[in-house]
Amino acid sequence: MAKKSKIAANERRKEVVARHAARRAELKRLIRSPHTAEEIREEAVRELRRQPRDASATRVRNRDSIDGRPRGHLRKFGLSRVRFRELAHRGELPGITKSSW
């Protein structure tokens, strides 16, 4: 089980990312566009730098939805590999069967 503070910090980061997502996308579009004037591009870069560090989506960590484990995350299920295996063995994941050949 991950520390409650780490899980809470990650949730806060998700909120910050969501709050700043539209403006960040607009600034990045301006910076990347070859048609943007140089002074506008420089101002966009400055504004992007002024935004909070946690506004970047790469700061969010994928975690197990049950216990918050940060490693071995299976995106399709929102679970860690350990939790996935436990739930699959108990038959609590519909459509998941153990391979046998």
Image (tube, grey):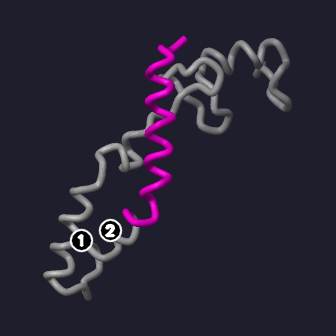
Q: Whole-percent x and y of residue 53? A: 29, 45
Q: Are marks 2 and 1 in contact (CB under 8 Å)?
A: no
Residue with the mark numbered 1: 44
**Residue type beneath disc 1:** Ala
Residue with the mark numbered 2: 28
Q: Whole-percent x and y of residue 9? A: 44, 29
Which sits earlier in the primary sequence, circle 2 or circle 1?
2
What whole-number distance in Å separates the C-alpha atoms at marks 2 and 1?
8 Å
Question: For this view, does 97 lie left or right of residue 43?
Answer: right
Q: Quadrant of residue 93?
A: top right
Residue at the image point whose x is 85% and y is 18% from the top: 91
Other-residue count near label 1 (Cα within 10 Å), few / some / many at <14 / 14–19 / ≥20: some
Q: Is residue 11 visible?
A: yes
The boundaries of the magenta stretch are 1-24
**What secondary structure is found at the residue carrying circle 1?**
helix
Q: Which of the image's four quarters has the C terminus? A: top right
Residue at the image point whose x is 42% and y is 57% from the top: 20
Magenta highlight: main SS: helix
Depth order, front residue of 1/76: 1
| 92 is higher (above) or lower (below) than 43 | above
**What secondary structure is found at the residue carrying circle 2?**
helix
| 1 is higher (above) or lower (below) than 51 | above
